[in-house]
């Protein structure tokens, strides 16, 4: 059915009131404009913090690593740092460097992943193929060095579990060179292709003042000129010894968030090279006690999405009293609600994607609520609507760019 | 560059009751304990007068008959001020800080769901992170809460 | 790649259309599923096509241990698929709860909620394992069909 008045499709399929499930996004709509958005989270709430109290610290390292499969090293490092601080352990320098290198490799895979997802959201699908192909270079390196493509199991309390050999280091350096070349092309696309610029500029605006007021973190905050990066402000692992730039932008929009991420990739390549050059010889772990003495610590880590925070309270036993995790995306919820207010519904997919939410966040149902009726859309229907809207209303079409990139892949 | 010792001195100077209640376990980390009656005063002072402009999160803790709340504030220099306060579990009312940090809304909802905190001043909204069907009087992160089998 | 030989029989089976659904996972398996569709692994070359709606899907590729919030949607999606339909549990936590066994907000596996046809373990399941698992499922269906 097609109502020419409001152009939305009536939801498909029967709605069983008995099988009610919470929509991820509830949009108050007037015509094509968003009045406000309610975001329902908790779809991947598993009860991890409670489980941590019932497991030993070592078991918790493996559990916490799986809070998020994109930034697993982030969470595991942030956690062990807190435990090590409470236990008064001095982690060997070599281990700190290895943690840093894995951390930056993780940032690279995450940002390349994001680039593909962003491309998919706006109809630039070849970017997904292209960037994820490059991402495979990093996945190979991670698998080679850590033994797994994801959930690397690199950390233990007191250090790391695996060393990086000279051969592996040489392979990492080769990969950095290759990726740097490829990333230069992404920067070229982002800064020179008018279709991209037109599509992303002025979208999802978050002024500098609002970014501060709403406490945005990570590339989202940095793209609005908020110069905060835990690696520089509150250094951990080996970051205190590395030279790098905190990338910010004054675009205050999705375009800015894109630029920040591709430029951060370049910084990551530099940091990994530095770290591999400066990494000292020595042990990769110190022995950790089974029982962690009573104490507390607040640990922070700059995940690819932004600041990750872990609080650990130890009680002298082999199990923590309390583990609290605040992942970065949660901190950007208010900011993203603000970015959508008074904007076109068609902006929604890329605006949400641009804060780099949990991947499945965009798998959620969207409820559109006007004064007198509601519609339920799947995310892919919203995406299709958005791509069509931009084609019809702003003449934005990615078929040319798709073909251009396709030819390059061959 | 904020120095933690200087911060401690400022805290004591402005709030004499905090003397002896301030811990500095390592560089860039300050822990302070405040009663509920003085909490907002200290909190606002830290934000407005000492530029702790970023709220990392709020941690809830179950300690016997009290519900502990730790507000983790960060300064751009990397210093973290962790303000610990508490309320009795029998009357776990706290005032919302969303007027200072709008982003705190989701952290406060989490305290309500998982610890049974009653946050005064929160607008209408979805609970987080539990489902609507989850019983309103069951708070999983309380120490005496055990999951029912299946 | 040895898998290609196994796939030769496939051509005879109607290209399976696949719906991917995350029941509250950490995303690692989801990304490996998508990665298996990118050029290096290229699941699509074997006829597998990702679909957005349950109505057109033959196979439901599920990740995650099923959190409470996702349970009803999982049931609904399964109900909306037309027969014959098959469910593949991708990743250890969707097989058995994995590392989340004992966590209060999970059902501990897809088969606690809907019937599962194939289990692909791994934390996460690698793209190769995913392809291998889907191929095995289709093979077993082919054998069923020829009986």
Image (spheres, rainbow, N blue to C red):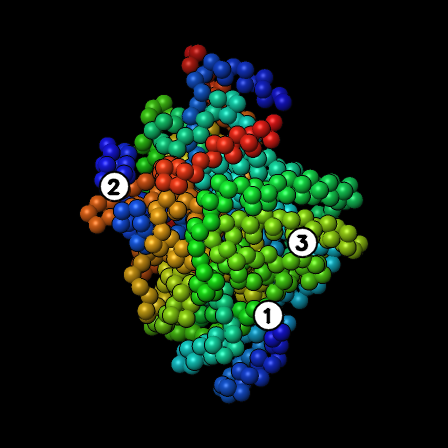
- As measured in the structure, the alpha-carbon distance from the residue carrying label 3 to the one carrying label 2 is 52 Å
Residue C117 visible in the shown view: no
Name the residue nearer the viewer: A213 or A82: A213
The residue to which callout 2 is attached is A6
Please tell me whether mark 1 sits on a helix, a strand or a loop: loop
Element assignment for label 2: loop
Q: Is residue A349 left or right of residue B79?
A: left
The local crowd at label 1, few if under 14, some if 14 to 19, many if 20 or more residues have their Cα within 10 Å, is some
Quadrant where the N terminus of chain C is found in the figure = top right
Residue drawn at (45%, 60%) of the image = A207
Label 2 to label 1, Cα distance in Å? 51 Å
Report the quarter where the C terminus of chain C lies. top left
Asked whether the residues under the numbered discs 3 and 2 touch, taking CB atoms below 8 Å apart as contact, a structural biologist would say no
Residue B77 numbered mark, or none: 1
Query: In screen coordinates, is A228 left or right of C75?
Result: right
Q: Residues within 10 Å of mark 2 (few under 14, many from 20)?
A: few
- Which residue ends up furthest to the top in the rendered image? C146
The chain carrying label 3 is A
Instruction: Give the CA distance from mark 3 to mark 1.
Output: 21 Å
Q: Which disc, if any, is residue B128?
A: none
Q: Nearer the viewer, mark 3 or mark 2?
A: 2
> Both on one chain, marks 3 and 1?
no
Q: Relative to residue C59, is residue A329 depicted above or below?
A: below
Q: Earlier in the sequence, mark 3 or mark 2?
A: 2
Is residue C93 depicted above or below C4 in this figure? Answer: below
Q: Is residue A117 above or below residue C133?
A: below
Residue at 40% of width from left, 81% of height from top? B37
For mark 1, name the chain: B
Q: Residue C123: x, y in percent?
A: 55, 40
Instruction: Give the left or right position of residue A21, taking residue A176 as reference.
Output: left
Name the residue tied to disc 3.
A100
Do labels 3 and 1 touch, CB within 8 Å? no
């Amino acid at each position: 059915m097609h109502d020419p008045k409001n152009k939305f499709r009536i939801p498909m399929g029967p709605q069983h009131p008995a099988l009610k499930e919470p929509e991820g996004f509830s949009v108050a709509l007037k015509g094509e404009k968003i009045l406000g958005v309610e975001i329902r989270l908790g779809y991947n709430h598993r009860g991890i913090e409670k489980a941590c109290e019932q497991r030993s610290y070592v078991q918790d390292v493996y559990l916490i690593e799986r809070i998020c499969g994109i930034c697993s090293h982030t969470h595991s490092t942030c956690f062990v740092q807190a435990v090590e601080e409470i236990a008064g352990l001095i982690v060997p320098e070599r281990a700190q460097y290895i943690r840093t290198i894995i951390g930056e490799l993780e940032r690279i895979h995450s940002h390349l992943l994001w680039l593909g997802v962003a491309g998919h959201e706006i109809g630039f699908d070849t970017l997904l193929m292209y960037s994820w192909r490059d991402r495979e270079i990093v996945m190979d390196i991670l698998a080679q060095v850590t033994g797994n493509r994801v959930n690397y199991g690199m950390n233990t309390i007191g250090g790391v579990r695996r060393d990086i050999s000279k051969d592996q280091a040489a392979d990492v350096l080769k990969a950095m060179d290759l990726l740097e070349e490829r990333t230069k092309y992404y920067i070229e696309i982002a800064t020179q292709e008018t279709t991209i610029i037109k599509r992303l500029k002025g979208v999802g605006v978050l002024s500098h003042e609002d970014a501060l007021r709403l406490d945005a973190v990570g590339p989202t905050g940095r793209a609005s000129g908020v110069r905060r990066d835990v690696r520089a402000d509150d250094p951990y692992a080996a970051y205190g010894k590395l030279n790098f730039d905190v990338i910010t932008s004054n675009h205050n929009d999705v375009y800015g968030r894109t630029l920040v991420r591709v430029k951060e990739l370049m910084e990551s390549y530099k940091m990994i090279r530095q770290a591999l050059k400066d990494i000292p010889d020595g042990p990769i772990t110190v022995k950790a006690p089974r029982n962690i003495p009573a104490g507390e610590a607040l640990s922070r880590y700059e995940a690819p999405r932004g600041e990750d925070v872990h609080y650990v309270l130890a009680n002298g036993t082999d199990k923590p009293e309390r583990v609290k995790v605040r992942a970065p995306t949660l901190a950007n919820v208010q900011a993203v609600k603000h970015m959508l207010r008074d904007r076109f519904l068609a902006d929604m997919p890329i605006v949400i994607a641009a804060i780099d939410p949990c991947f499945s966040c965009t798998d959620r149902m969207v409820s559109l609520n006007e004064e007198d009726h509601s519609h339920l859309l799947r995310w892919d229907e919203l995406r299709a609507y958005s791509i069509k809207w931009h084609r019809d209303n702003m003449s934005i079409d990615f078929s040319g760019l798709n073909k251009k990139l396709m030819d390059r892949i061959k | 560059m904020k120095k933690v010792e200087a911060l401690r001195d400022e805290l004591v100077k402005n709030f004499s009751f905090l003397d002896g209640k301030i811990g500095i376990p390592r560089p860039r980390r300050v822990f302070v304990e405040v009663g509920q009656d003085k909490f907002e005063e200290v909190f606002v002072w830290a934000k407005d007068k000492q530029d702790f402009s970023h709220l990392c999160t709020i941690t809830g803790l179950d300690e016997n008959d009290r519900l502990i709340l730790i507000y983790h504030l960060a300064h751009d220099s990397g210093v973290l001020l962790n303000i610990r306060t508490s309320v009795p579990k029998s009357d776990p009312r706290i005032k919302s800080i969303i007027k200072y940090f709008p982003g705190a809304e989701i952290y406060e909802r989490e305290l309500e769901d998982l610890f049974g905190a009653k946050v005064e001043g929160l607008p209408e909204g979805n609970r987080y992170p539990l489902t609507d069907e989850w019983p309103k009087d069951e708070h999983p992160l309380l120490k005496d809460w055990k999951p029912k089998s299946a | 790649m040895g898998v290609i030989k196994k796939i030769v029989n496939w051509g005879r089976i109607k290209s399976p259309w696949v719906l991917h659904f995350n029941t509250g996972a950490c995303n690692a398996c989801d990304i490996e599923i998508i990665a298996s569709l990118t050029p290096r692994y290229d699941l699509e070359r074997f006829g597998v096509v990702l679909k957005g709606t349950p109505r057109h899907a033959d196979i439901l590729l599920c990740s995650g241990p099923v959190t409470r919030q996702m349970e009803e949607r999982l049931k609904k999606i399964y109900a909306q698929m037309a027969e014959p339909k098959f469910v593949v549990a991708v990743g250890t936590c969707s097989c058995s709860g994995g590392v989340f066994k004992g966590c209060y907000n999970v059902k501990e596996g897809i088969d606690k909620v809907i019937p599962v046809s194939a289990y692909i373990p791994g934390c996460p399941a690698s793209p190769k394992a995913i392809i291998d698992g889907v191929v095995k499922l289709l093979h077993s269906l082919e054998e069923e069909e020829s009986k």
